Image: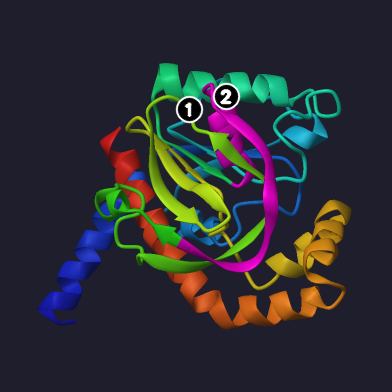
Amino acid sequence: MGAGQHARLLILTRQVSGLAHMKLLVFQHIGCEHPGIFRQFFDEARIDWDVVKLDAGEQIPPLERFDALWVMGGPMDVWDTDSCPWLVPEKEAIRRWVQTLKKPFLGLCLGHQLLADSLGGTCGWTDKPEIGILDVDLAEEAKDDPLLRGVDASIKCLQWHSVSVTTPPAGALLLASSPDCQWQAMRVGKNAWGLQFHVELQESTVQEWSEVPAYAEALEKAKGCSALAEMKRDANALMPEFNRNARVIFDNFTEVMRRF
């Protein structure tokens, strides 16, 4: 082994060692919207992670036991508290996590919207649903952002939403936008991030999500009956890029975890 390889191995070993005792909590709202490719990254970094299946009635554990919180996507909306009453304690947990415990937080799609809603922002129907492989442009502020630095200024992302953040919470910093959705990414304070777009993709993701009736209906309405095959083809072609972006974001998030 050369000196350079040995040095890189030592750095990787120290990084993994520094994360080995970290505990990450995941809020999940439907079985197919899990952390995706990040599950592999969690295991490689030896991060201990627990999933709370809120839609299945699982209870939120004591938050103090965990070092980071991720909130995933789902077909429900932030205001669907009558049909999904668990949204109420979930929002309370997010608010307490971000504002009181002040530990690292990442929300994806619905999780991004729940971050805004929990902290006093608002969400609403988009004029034009974003469904498909679409462009997202990072703001200038993202270049130095702890989560998004190293991500290209313009990226292709999978989008599958008809609701977006319309009013951000107080103090939110805009990190990314698209033509039809201003608040594609934001940071709140120094510890909380929300991404409207999806970065957790695997080769099975599009097919699994298309089997959710609400998602299938939205896809066909927005793109037509042949849209699924096209989306699969485009997603598979871009999977290396999706996974590279996921790796950058994961590595950046673990650096944030080490600082807290």
Marks 1, 2: nearer the viewer: 1
Q: Secondary structure at mark 1?
A: loop
Q: Is residue 109 above or below residue 132?
A: above
Q: Which mark is residue 169?
A: 1
Q: Are marks 1 and 2 in contact (CB under 8 Å)?
A: yes
Magenta stretch: give its range.
109-136
Q: Residues within 10 Å of mark 2 (few under 14, many from 20)?
A: many
User: Residue at the location (30% across, 47% down)?
Assistant: 146
Mark earlier in primary sequence (1, 2): 2
Residue type (three-letter) at the residue carrying disc 2: Ser
Residue 216 visible here: yes
User: x and y percent of residue 139 in the render?
Assistant: 35, 53
Residue at the spot of label 2: 118
30 horizontally vs 150: left or right: right
User: Residue at the location (47% across, 37% down)?
Assistant: 23
Colour scheme in use: rainbow
Number of dots carrying numbers: 2
Which quadrant would the N terminus be assigned to in this image?
bottom left
30 horizontally vs 42: left or right: right
Residue type (three-letter) at the residue carrying disc 1: Pro
Looking at the picture, tell me which residue is in the foreground, 168 or 253: 168
Which quadrant would the C terminus be assigned to in this image?
top left
User: Residue at the location (58% across, 55% down)?
Assistant: 180
User: x and y percent of residue 55 in the render?
Assistant: 79, 35
Q: Secondary structure at mark 2?
A: helix
Residue 129 is one of the magenta-drawn residues: yes
In three-dimensional space, the C-alpha distance between marks 1 and 2, rounded to whole angstroms, equals 8 Å
Q: Is residue 18 above or below residue 105?
A: below
Residue 60 is one of the magenta-drawn residues: no
